[in-house]
Amino acid sequence: MMEKVNIPEIFAEDVFTDAVMQERLPKSVYKQFKKSIDEGRDLDLATADVIANEIRTWAIAKGATHFAHLFQPLTGVTAEKQDSFITAPKADGSVVTAFSGKELIKGEPDGSSFPSGGLRVTFEARGYTVWDTTSSVFVRHDAAGTTLLIPTAFYSYNGEALDQKAPLLRSMQVISDSSIKLLRLFGNTSAKKVAPSVGAEQEYFLVDAAKFEQRKDLIYTGRTLFGAAAPKGQELDDHYFGTIRQRVASFMKNINEELWKVGIPSKTQHNEVAPAQHEIAPIYANANVAVDQNQVVMQTLKRIACQHDMKCLLHEKPFAGVNGSGKHNNWSLVTDTGENLLEPGDTPHENKQFLLVLAAIIKAVDKYAGLLRESAADPGNDHRLGANEAPPAIISVFLGSQLEDIINQYIETGSASTSIEGGFLTTGSAALKDITKDATDRNRTSPFAFTGNKFEFRMVGSRDSIASPNIVLNTIVAEAFDDASERLAKATDFDAEVDALISEYAKAHSRIIFNGDGYSDEWVVEAEKRGLPNLKSIVDATEVLESEDVINLFDKYGVLTPTELKAREEVKYENYAKVINIEALTMIDMATKQIIPAVIKYTKSLADTVIAVKAAGSDASVQADILGEVSDLLKATKSALTELKAVTEQATQKEEGKVQARFYNEVVFKAMDALRAPVDKLEMIVDKEAWPMPSYGDLMFEV
């Protein structure tokens, strides 16, 4: 009988929550801690020592032997350096455990070996991790035992941000300050803070571990570099929201339990469109907490998959010809009193504050469309964006019929007097009740879509940290809010000026609004006519970071200094070049050591068959035709392999940075495609028993 799970009983049992703090800490210490957060002040060491001691006692009771600062360097994954709680042994040989406030607040990992774009070099090794007091510490149970994990930001010795968390926290302060300034002008005197609320829908694939281990491309790169299409893909749409296979269901059960224990409110799970593809989504949290939680989700997916003899693939496009995986970043702004600034209300045409917020966001997204695209730029996303399951590389905003109608009213008349209502959906059956409809439909083809009371940025790649898009959204919207506040503060007629701003922003930036089919070829043509950027590759997108507007934006708000931004640009180019180089070398290795030898062996078998059939006096033309076809494809494979080797070697000689990255994008990447083409054709001909690796069908349908 399956063990019953009591969600309230296990939820956050491994988290040092606010409730646990209140229970365990002296009232004066707890009040001092909360005050330091509310006022943005440093936590004094005496208070930190008391908190650290209680955390140590709590964690050890949970079985913890080590602690670690959990940080997010520019690798896309988390990092940690674990230390045990033991102190130096006593004279009698015994040891005691200790954990100081200093150890809680600050760590000193080596900062030289992470991607930093030149902010760190080997002889400048010191880095600092600093406790993010707004994100709860927790314990993790795994094969290494139990470890206390402390969410942190990561800085260089000179104070430069070396991670995703530091600029995210800066951007959250910026959007809060700008939002409060705007709210005060609308008469809101109760709100003290505004936080970006974020929910990340995580897509992933599951494959059998034994089959995964037979694919060097999956091991080294996370995606299949070769692979002919299976006879069945996703064309029947039968996997989407279909019944979850029992093996996968067991995995999902364990995932939920693990996430609930560490306080992650895992809410939704279902099969996605492609075979073997699935999705998990939590309830929303403040942006920095949501970023931390999403990193834990990705780690947990991989860890628990191994326990079920499976592998979790988080690459944006692990299989050609079927849907890739994204990460939908749902973003809204919520005050500390619970007001969502993106809640339109029942009559949005009368909600002037909402309409100005909406218009300012439209302005921000149009002005910085390239930057928002860059925030989702990832080598794997180059394969996904623009395919039939993902938004194109063109940024556009979907509003839905109700809000688009209101915006059009402002464009035409300078105000709005009506809102389209949702109405009812008639079921046509006495067994079913008629239901109310939303005032607008959804658009799954839009990269930036308004969905009720939030915007859903659907361009983010499945492996990526969601920090980058939220840093961008927070900062560009803060600038738009500040521009509006500056105008409104000088207005003699506040209401008239609000209408004027909404109308002005709507007219100037309506080109970014598109409610149609973002997958269509017609939209690509139309977007070009509108002057919208179409940055198809990560190399194209990264160039946006060189723009004076972008440099000045981040510098003005203190989110990223010009030096920090330049470093991130260098990391992007360097990462792309390394990823493509690894993929090219993996293809060369697989073709040389596995595919070509297997095909040669198969051609010998065919040749022997032709000779034997002819000797028996029978017609061997079919066998001879197949031998000829295989031999021609083998020759094409060898030729393409030689070319890929040559251009990959050339790439390593190019000047590092944008020049090298562009060569990999424009030359090496094409040579990789040229090698894949004949190999995939060979896979369709060569005997399955002779083919040296599991097929797409094996990987996607046998899990």
Image: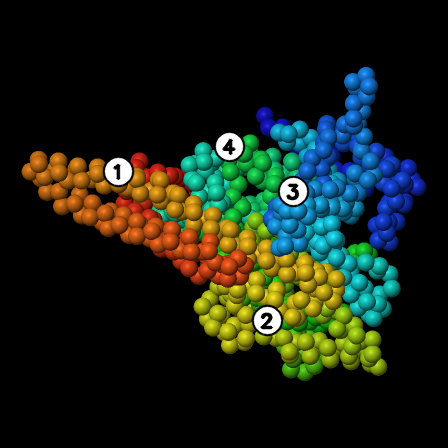
* Three-letter amino acid code of the residue under disc 1: Lys
> Do we see residue 80 in this rendering?
yes
- Secondary-structure class at tag 4: loop
Q: Residue at x 47, y 48 (%)?
A: 582
* Three-letter amino acid code of the residue under disc 2: Ile
Residue 349, x across and y down, in percent: 71, 72
Which label sits in the foreground, 3 or 2? 3
Vertical relation: 529 (above or below) 595: below
Distance (Cα) linking label 2 and label 1: 57 Å
Work out which quarter of the rendered image holds the N terminus and state it.
top right
* Three-letter amino acid code of the residue under disc 4: Asp
- The residue labelled by disc 1 is 601
Residue 365, x across and y down, in percent: 64, 68
Which label sits in the foreground, 1 or 4? 1
| First reached walking from the N terminus: tag 3 or tag 1 | 3
Q: Residue at x 50, y 54 (%)?
A: 577
- The residue labelled by disc 4 is 309
Q: Residue at x 26, y 50 (%)?
A: 635
